[in-house]
Image: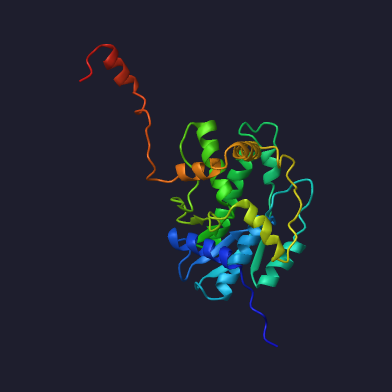
Amino acid sequence: MEKKRRSLPRTYTRKILRAIREFELIEPGDRVLVGFSGGKDSAFLLYALSILQEHQVIDFELAALTLDLGFFTPLDPEPLERFANSLGIKLFTMKTEIAKAAFSADNPEGPCATCSFLRRGTMNRFAKEKGFQKIALAHHHDDAVETFLMSIIYSGQIKTFLPNTLLDRTGLRVIRPLVYFRESELKKAAHFIDYQPIGKVCPVDGLTKRAEMKEYIRKLSRQHKGIFTNLAAAMREGRPQELWPAELTQEEKRRRNLGKDQ
């Protein structure tokens, strides 16, 4: 009996293919490593890319990596491995002590920044050692808008993450094929994916600045339905900008105070 081919709803297929083609995320011959945390977003990413591979939309290799961060609640890899096996995808797992370093009492950076930094470094090294050219992460459209607003408020910079980022030191590319999906769409995907996301293991999950920003945008959107759309538009190049000039250097300030600026 011939195995039934899996598929995605047409609206989902259009969005992921739009991102892949618009930002040149995956090309024939690529070896792509998915960061699979066990949550709903990365599960959908793995599922969707496996379908594109199965239907030979693009000829590329696909595997996944799960990092056990070493929290008090041990990570059970069995459901993740079962899901990956059902897709015909090789899943690598790696035990780390990232949580211990992130929540160290003498960590001045705070747990979230340290955890993110160490996770990225670990994944990058693994991908490089195993010969992957690209790391696929499951950041979606809401993540991009939240990052954009957080960057303005907390660091005074107008930026967000890119759908396709070249890492100069390693030559790897980090790609984000889900950038056109709203988080609500990924939640609905649970209806056609036979997978139960693992529970939260991080003690600060839901208590971060990102969680605050998500709630802030949600509150603003209740008052004005166009808030999210406007923020998403503002993070695109080519939008009208009226910004103050760059801040003067100390030398320029000195010269102007002396009246000698030409």
Q: Residue at x 73, y 63 (%)?
A: 195
The residue sitting at the bottom extreme is: 1
Quarter occupied by the C terminus: top left
Q: Residue at x 55, y 43 (%)?
A: 228
Residue 36 visible in the shown view: no
Q: Position of residue 2 (x, y in %)?
A: 67, 86
Could you say which is closer to the camera, residue 170 or residue 174? 174
Residue 39, image quadrant: bottom right
Q: Residue at x 70, y 61 (%)?
A: 190
Could you say which is closer to the camera, residue 60 or residue 183? 183
Looking at the image, is 234 positioned above or below residue 247?
Answer: below
Q: Position of residue 176 (x, y in %)?
A: 53, 55
Q: Position of residue 46 (x, y in %)?
A: 62, 63
The residue sitting at the left extreme is: 262
Query: In the shown orientation, is residue 117 left or right of residue 259?
Result: right
The colour scheme used to paint the residues is: rainbow
Query: In the shown orientation, is residue 246 left or right of residue 204?
Result: left
Looking at the image, is 135 positioned above or below residue 227?
Answer: below
Residue 47, image quadrant: bottom right
